[in-house]
Image (tube, helix red, strand yellow):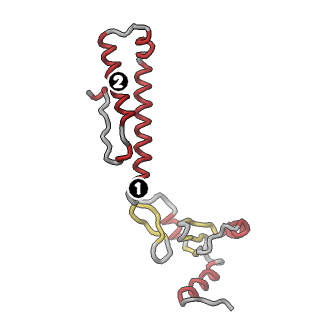
């Protein structure tokens, strides 16, 4: 005989037996994922059927399997069903990753601009005129400033101002 630690476990166990025949979808609060009922046997054979899967109505599936409202993500609520929750603020590591990406993108754009003007080749041949040499020098200073940006202070980063905006 199956032992249950509480009336809730007994009820949930009974529901799991009941829902096998009456629901098209299951929801796993732990995985925060939906599982089609018609694929249950395949998941079980693969050993990947979640132990906490609960049968849910098509209405709940349709409500929470779409793109979330602005500023929301799907979370598992206290009752084990899906709900919409606030998107948490990015972690410091995520902010740093974003800053690394932005920094590299700005460096790449700057190099592309400089090389598009052919300033390095012209400078090597001594063919830069005064105004062009001045602009090249400003862009090189900007590139040096970009390389010097300390991304560890994300999100409080002081980004150099592009010479295009001066």
Q: Secondary structure at mark 2?
A: helix
Q: Quadrant of residue 164?
A: top left
- Residue, x 31% and y 22% (percent of image)? 138
- Residue, x 42% and y 45% (percent of image)? 98
Question: Furthest residue to the right?
Answer: 45
Horizontal and vertical percent position of residue 44: 70, 70
Q: Is residue 155 above or below residue 57?
A: above
Q: Secondary structure at mark 1?
A: loop
- Residue, x 68% and y 69% (percent of image)? 40
Which residue is the site of mark 1?
91
Q: What number of labels is visible?
A: 2
Q: Residues within 10 Å of mark 1 (few under 14, many from 20)?
A: few
Query: Could you tell whether 157 is left or right of 111 in the image?
Result: left
Image disc number at residue 139 = 2
Horizontal and vertical percent position of residue 32: 53, 66
Q: Nearer the viewer, residue 12 or 117?
A: 117
């Amino acid at each position: 005989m199956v032992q249950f630690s509480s009336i809730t476990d007994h009820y949930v166990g009974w529901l799991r037996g009941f829902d096998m025949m009456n629901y098209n979808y299951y929801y796993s609060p732990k995985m925060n994922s939906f599982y089609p009922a018609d694929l249950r046997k395949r998941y079980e054979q693969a050993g990947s059927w979640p132990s906490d899967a609960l049968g849910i109505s098509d209405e709940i599936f349709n409500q929470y399997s779409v793109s979330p409202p602005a500023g929301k993500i799907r979370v598992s609520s206290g009752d084990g069903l899906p709900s919409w929750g606030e998107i948490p603020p990015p972690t410091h590591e995520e902010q740093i990753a974003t800053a690394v990406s932005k920094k590299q993108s700005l460096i790449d754009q700057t190099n592309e601009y400089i090389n598009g003007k052919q300033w390095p080749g012209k400078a090597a041949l001594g063919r830069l005129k005064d105004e062009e040499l001045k602009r090249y020098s400003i862009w090189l200073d900007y590139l040096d400033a970009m390389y010097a940006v300390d991304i560890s202070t994300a999100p409080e980063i002081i980004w150099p101002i592009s010479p295009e905006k001066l």
